[in-house]
Image (cartoon, coloured by chain):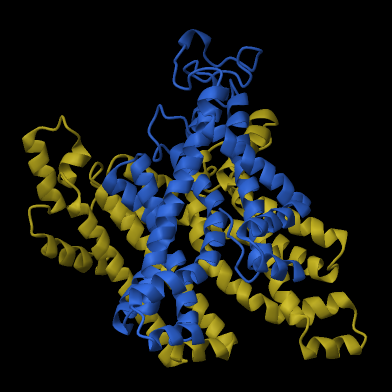
Amino acid sequence: MSSVAEASASTPDRQRFVLLRALLADPFTFVAVILVAGFLLTAIFAPWLAPYSPVKIDVLHKLQPPSAEHWFGTDHLGRDLLSRVIYGARTALTIAMVSVAIAGAIGLVLGLIAGYGPRWLDAILVLTFDSLNSLPMIMFALAIITVLGAGTGTLIIVIAATSFPSYARLIRAQTLALKNSDYILAERLIDASAARIIFIHLLPNVVGPLIILLSMDIPVVIMVEAGLSFLGLGVRPPTPSWGSILYDGYTSIRSAPFMVIFGGLPLVLATLGFTFLGEGLRDYLDPRLQARRPS
Amino acid sequence: MLTYAVKRIGLGLLILILVMIAMYAAVFLVPGDPATVALGPRATPELKRLLIERMGLDQPVWWQIIEFFRNALTGNLGYDVWSNRPVSTLVLEALPNTMVLGLTALAIALLIGVPLGCLSVMRRGTAADAVIGVLSVGVIAVPSFVVAIYSLLVFAVTLRWLPAIGAGEAGDFASQAKALVMPAAAIALGWIGYIARMVRASMMEVMGEPHIRTARSFGLPEWKIVSKYALRIAIIPTISLVAVGLGSILSSAVFVEAVFARPGIGKLITDAVNTRNYPVVMGTVLIMTAIYVSITIAADLLIARLDPRVRDVFRG
């Protein structure tokens, strides 16, 4: 407790350092940080790390088991599996971060409006959040894909649309709790504008728990992207995705079992890494938040 | 209690109606009419006209929505664009398989997860507690369809202990049970961890209450205190979490059914999405949403019955 008090009294740089140190103290979070950092670096430097092009077809060398030239072997079209797995990290992390950021922004704005705005608007928004939340997520997602057609854009819309209501609910609850606190009342007394109160005073105070929740949802989104791509309803071929690698491997599971093994491992490691990191962040910053559900 | 029940059910119905209107509206907001999308670019004009008539697309939108609800209330959800079979029949054929899968998975998860959570509380602070804690988070994190594919590789392809695909021979219980093992276990794995954590967390709160102290002062053994006095209260939040979580069991079922080529709701709807078969998608979504909303309402009512504080919150 004393370390937190010390940290908040000093500069933000020092604060970050304390957080990192606290995270690295737990062995599982430590491994998680390394895994996540590894995947982030892989995604960023994919073009330099991948030994071959992820989409170059070489049918003469299809379904080759792992070898010195192709560490993870080749797929049914002779594409280098290692390169596809590396670029798959890029696909997975890009979609996860973009869609979670969009959902977080929508949730933040609507949550602030619901919490601070007039009561009738709050009632309408809460009904909307509850309606969306009370749908079985997968049914809603498949309905959107039917209407819009599969693809990366649709995937981002699907994830944003299915996840923003829980963010908005969180922000609304936080805003409601702060709305009648002394410092906000004081602002209102000196005639501060709603925009000033919301953006300068409420926003910084409600955004913390949201960031934890967002980080805890990243592994879920990675799994949804892979799952839908596995079903052929996610990213379009030939874009490499761990889900479509798993599907390609699944169709030749008897002749080339190494494909599902190498396609599934990064997915498992990434979801494990992000989950343990999210857990660590939550335990340190806000233990009251609920654990995530299995996917 | 009655007011609470009426309010809760009313809200559920309202949600269902709003969802269907939104979905219907979405279909019409998309450029290009559903018939063209379903038939593809090479369809002849006559074929298109036939399909438009059959799907009722030549009527105004508001009329279609009313028609859809009127038909839905009488159990008619429209017809499959391709086979022309009633959507309700397709869903009713697929539903039992998915329900058996989901409920088996849930039963496995409860049977293993609840005792694990109790064990964690009894041995709190020890290595066993820590191991259960880490394993729980670990299994929650692993996607169920990857578990499904890996178990397919190990137990069906390599060891040949279990069938790789399908739901077993009709009427043959042993073969159906065999076909159920891997899909159910793949879905259950994450839920074992989730339930263990939830039971542990809510039981830790209960353990500080006076009646537990009393039981302990009587010198009752720890396992008896946990299983008899603490679990009874601690299980309440778990019930609601399980009910809300049925939606994610359904998600897992969709993916896992695809891996094991198991006939069910998942296969029905993914095939329909792939062929842009609107009536089947909408009918399936409507039925599954209705079932899901009813289950969450039932769970809420059950909890309100067990815990009077919930009713007061809703009234407030």
Q: Residue furthest top?
A: A60
Q: Residue at x 36, y 68 (%)?
A: A110
Q: Residue furthest right?
A: B219
Residue B93 position within the rendered picture, expressed as x and y whole percent measured from the top left: 40, 53
Q: Name the residue nearer the viewer: B309 or A53.
A: A53
Chain identifier for the yellow-coloured part of the image: B
Residue B196 sits in which quadrant? bottom right
Residue A221 position within the rendered picture, expressed as x and y whole percent measured from the top left: 49, 49
B239 vs A127, left or right, is right
Residue B16 sits in which quadrant? bottom left
In the rendering, what colour is chain A? Answer: blue
A242 shown above or below A184 = above
Residue B110 position within the rendered picture, expressed as x and y whole percent measured from the top left: 67, 64
Q: Residue at x 66, y 41 (%)?
A: A35
Residue A1 position within the rendered picture, expressed as x and y whole percent measured from the top left: 75, 71
A224 shown above or below B70 = above
Residue B271 seen from this side: no
B150 shown above or below A215 = above
B82 shown above or below A70 = below
Q: Name the residue nearer the viewer: A162 or B281.
A: A162
Q: Name the residue nearer the viewer: A229 or B99.
A: A229
Residue B184 seen from this side: yes
